[in-house]
Amino acid sequence: MYQIPMSGNSFGRHFIIHTFGESHGAALGAIVDGCPAGLDFDLSFLQSELDRRRPGTNQSVSSRQEPDQVEVLSGVFQGKTLGTPIALIVRNQDQRSADYDQIQNQPRPGHADDIWRQKYGHVDHRGGGRSSGRETVSRVLGGAVAKMVLQKIYPNLKFETRIIQMGPFQNPSETQIAEALEKAKAQGESFGAQIELRIQNPPPSLGQPVFHKLKSDLAGAMMSVGATTAIEFGAGTAAGFAKGTEFHRSNQAVYGGLRGGISTGEDIVMKITMKPTSSILDVAKQGRHDPCIGLRARPVFEAMAALVLVDHHLGLNQDQFR
Amino acid sequence: MYQIPMSGNSFGRHFIIHTFGESHGAALGAIVDGCPAGLDFDLSFLQSELDRRRPGTNQSVSSRQEPDQVEVLSGVFQGKTLGTPIALIVRNQDQRSADYDQIQNQPRPGHADDIWRQKYGHVDHRGGGRSSGRETVSRVLGGAVAKMVLQKIYPNLKFETRIIQMGPFQNPSETQIAEALEKAKAQGESFGAQIELRIQNPPPSLGQPVFHKLKSDLAGAMMSVGATTAIEFGAGTAAGFAKGTEFHRSNQAVYGGLRGGISTGEDIVMKITMKPTSSILDVAKQGRHDPCIGLRARPVFEAMAALVLVDHHLGLNQDQFR
Amino acid sequence: MYQIPMSGNSFGRHFIIHTFGESHGAALGAIVDGCPAGLDFDLSFLQSELDRRRPGTNQSVSSRQEPDQVEVLSGVFQGKTLGTPIALIVRNQDQRSADYDQIQNQPRPGHADDIWRQKYGHVDHRGGGRSSGRETVSRVLGGAVAKMVLQKIYPNLKFETRIIQMGPFQNPSETQIAEALEKAKAQGESFGAQIELRIQNPPPSLGQPVFHKLKSDLAGAMMSVGATTAIEFGAGTAAGFAKGTEFHRSNQAVYGGLRGGISTGEDIVMKITMKPTSSILDVAKQGRHDPCIGLRARPVFEAMAALVLVDHHLGLNQDQFR
Amino acid sequence: MYQIPMSGNSFGRHFIIHTFGESHGAALGAIVDGCPAGLDFDLSFLQSELDRRRPGTNQSVSSRQEPDQVEVLSGVFQGKTLGTPIALIVRNQDQRSADYDQIQNQPRPGHADDIWRQKYGHVDHRGGGRSSGRETVSRVLGGAVAKMVLQKIYPNLKFETRIIQMGPFQNPSETQIAEALEKAKAQGESFGAQIELRIQNPPPSLGQPVFHKLKSDLAGAMMSVGATTAIEFGAGTAAGFAKGTEFHRSNQAVYGGLRGGISTGEDIVMKITMKPTSSILDVAKQGRHDPCIGLRARPVFEAMAALVLVDHHLGLNQDQFR
């Protein structure tokens, strides 16, 4: 019997990434289609973005070793983009399928393995196939190119992500985080997190009035990341408790840099909540789990935000008369 | 000089609505493309859904009179769908453009008029054009057809929406709501709201593993509705404060009916926050504003959820072998 | 049992038409999405284009009376486009379903009724539903708006369509055509036709290098019109008999205004072949058939060409940096 | 200054290929998205299809050596498709950029180099970038997977392509072709060609009634291949000379296996015309040109036809109720 394919592997309408790769296959990657020609292509920046999401960069996160070396197969010539699709791949080095063979037939608790089997009639037991956090490599690849584009057109635009809540810890300092995760790892514990994503000095006018409001595309983008459970803009959930007379006469921050679904030019501020990783329940990851994926998720959320912004920027003059 | 068009007026990939109409133009409507043939078309249900979003149905909401009579132009023959595009229109009866002429050149505070003018170089001053809440008529039209489809394939599936917070009032009763809004209206006050949207008895297996996780499409859909400021699934923002050992061993409710981005078959539970309407600041709407749009928004959120569910259902066997 | 919907009702990527309507339903129409704001909207031109495709404008074509009055429901305000979707509808006046009731259960020879029933499990017997030539009303509506756009940006661009073959008649004159069709109609005869479509003074650079070569999109567009059986560019079929040394050293005409799939700026020349109408075999149309649909098809082919050109024009600076 | 990107690198709506790679870059490839899971993946067949389009397989075609070894990066596990994107790459072995350096600044006559420069403000002089015939490697990769799908669901479906005209030679035999091309190569001559593509035992019901008629998608697909100048179905151009009474009473062959834009189940017969290659004018290809690309184009046309058929097959029950 034939099964349903897993689709929905592409993101964007003007600046598009087509992603591929299973967590334990030969390689993962992204085709970036829609990137203008003549852009300086900064390979070392691309690699550095990959490294930011990589586990094992400090002892608080998974010790699985993944060099994650990117290779450019097309779209770049003599250091500049050609305007053709940019094919980027990262080979999987450490596949550790062995770890998974033992659980081939036992779905990992908290994971979606049973859901996959129910839907697709099969499951790539080697680490969740496309549903593994490893797929975010493709997002970071595409997001890095998007950042190169933004850097060129909006030099003052910056992405700032910080952990404002980590389980019981509010606005934790670097040291607090390191200590807490150290302990958590030893104890087989994990924490949820709230991340503030601030887009500084964005352009105004990004977003469309009905279904593609900027906030709609940003919310969909962030919610497509594995463990995300909530998305807030500006005042967020607090707005539900507010009275209009107070709310609208308070400072602009309550709007989070958006009105009518369109960027105003003020900083765009989102709050993203992630649930604690379920890997703690996973025999295969015993002692190698991430106690707080919120840390590694930051470059992923930045990547998704960059993709949405460039997509809307390019959409800006999509149909404009010359 | 020519300006940028407003695009992003279509929603869905398999079951698609193409929306059109300005709040004070001749008509609004939706073309529903992708609805299977042979479905019983329940026109009275369609009209009743429209009436649910209509202001003036009780005194607590805007007294603007809009009969909102739907007309079916195509796609239905002898009470059954033909499988061809279903064209649905609602003519604007009460356009009150006069109200708006006075403010033609003064952007309405809190509204996006100035943002529009900055982006599009012009603004349809007659009530915000596409950005008015009136555009939700098109969503409800499409959503009603989506509900007919769901009703047929998943007879036990139900949408339940309730106000769990309205400004200062928590889990308010019908009478509390009525009184509070009565007073608010007189005082030119408005309230934010939190709405719980519960999808009862949904099918399992809806959603795709990467960018089109069901939660991602639902979040984008809800966030595309005007005043929405936050979206939560299951435990929502609370998950950020949680420890994994407790979280994953607590009851299933924390997952909100989703795992790995895919529906499990358990009830899907979302919490949607809306900010207080800014109409209170709008001279043109003096005394005719909605003190809490959360009330009228419920059928709109249900419509968006129905559209997402049908779209994913039809995607289910999109590529399945016969 | 539920049936498959008829999809594929939208055309274009940047300048898009969403079409709807059955030949004997309440109305047909098109939503034009992607038209820039601020364009002068020429309603009388739109109506005149509709009249060009209308039967009964001279005695040589079908005497079925269709006033085909267009109504604009949205997207235009004070004579200018708003940049919002332009909803255009044409109500069906003369539905003559009676003619068709008699053949409700007997597929019309030469028509696709039996094919429809096989595919969709039902058939709208009232004139073929979407498959009737009447659906071209929607194409002409969208094409007329596209022509308004082209007229503004490329004032010298012109579409010229002429019958170069009509059955046995080569390069027939107006009088020859009139006489021949008169006779054909009386005799229940019909003719195939070859139409030359010349796009004069097109812009260069339209088209993309791989799948969306301009010739590819034009060929697909023309072939989507009912009776089309062949599409040729420049030298067309003759190129298959050619030797390179002669071909490439002959005049530019052999290229038809295209190289590498992209317009050169020279006139684009296509030859379109249509088969004889099968209506002659249709009892319901006895004496009311079009002896040569090639005549009425000309504005339809022009409309499709205009849609493709505007779509590619708007794609031109889709992703260009500002 | 930034330039326009080259987009339109993806093909299909349900069974989609995303293509990438420049003729003289590191690699070319295709991501196949939408292929169902559980299909036996025949790698040797995939390689054999690549070999069919490869020059140098007999002395009559270009002697440029291209091993064209395919590598599978994702989507296949233990010999079966996973339903995830199938990433296929072919590295460029023999890049011979040297040949091209000499002509870096002189556009190759007959080629589109000057058109590219005009459009994109730059040109990848190393062999035309995306516009080189080399991009068809990606089409063949995707088409081979499409054929695997068809082979499984429609075991009797076969593609047959034959040269029915090669310059002055009508229905040439293998030996005639070999001799003629041998001579042509020596003389720096090239020939146009007409190819008959016959799809034997196709399923009925493929195609949609308006814009996505099967003939429309097939015509667009074939016309997207470089040197194609004409597409004919069934009677093709001859239909323009026909009288309805004779035409419709003649044998079914005149319809080419299609009615109402939908496959009838009879063999689908197309005639494709290609112009003589312009490489004969290309100093860089002196003595290495293909005297008749019609030969190598056959697997490419089959690949495009297979992609269209699978796409329509998967669209068949896209929206069907389960």
Image: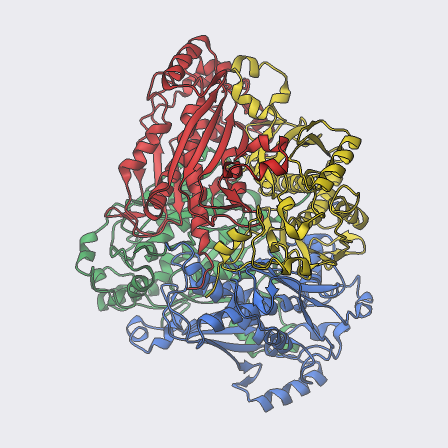
Chain colours: A blue, B green, C red, D yellow
Reply above or below: A158 against C218.
Answer: below
Quadrant of the frame with the N terminus of chain A: top right
Residue drawn at (54%, 61%) of the image: B216
Reply above or below: D320 against B178.
Answer: above
Q: Residue furthest top?
A: C187
Q: Is residue C131 left or right of residue A175?
A: left
Reply above or below: A73 against A65.
Answer: above
The x, y position of residue B42, in whole percent, is 44, 39
| Quadrant housing residue B174 | bottom left
Quadrant of the frame with the C terminus of chain A: bottom left
Residue drawn at (56%, 25%) of the image: D237
Residue drawn at (34%, 42%) of the image: C156
Whether residue A132 is visible here, answered yes or no, is: yes
| Quadrant housing residue A255 | bottom left
Q: Residue furthest front?
A: D187
Q: Nearer the viewer, residue C104 or C153?
A: C153
Residue drawn at (46%, 30%) of the image: C196
Whether residue B42 is visible here, answered yes or no, is: no
Q: Nearer the viewer, residue D106 or D224?
A: D106
The x, y position of residue A47, in whole percent, is 63, 75
The x, y position of residue C188, in whole percent, is 46, 11
Q: Nearer the viewer, residue D266 or D3?
A: D3
Q: Is residue B220 left or right of residue C243?
A: left
Q: Nearer the viewer, residue C9 or A74?
A: A74
* Count of marks placed on residues: 0
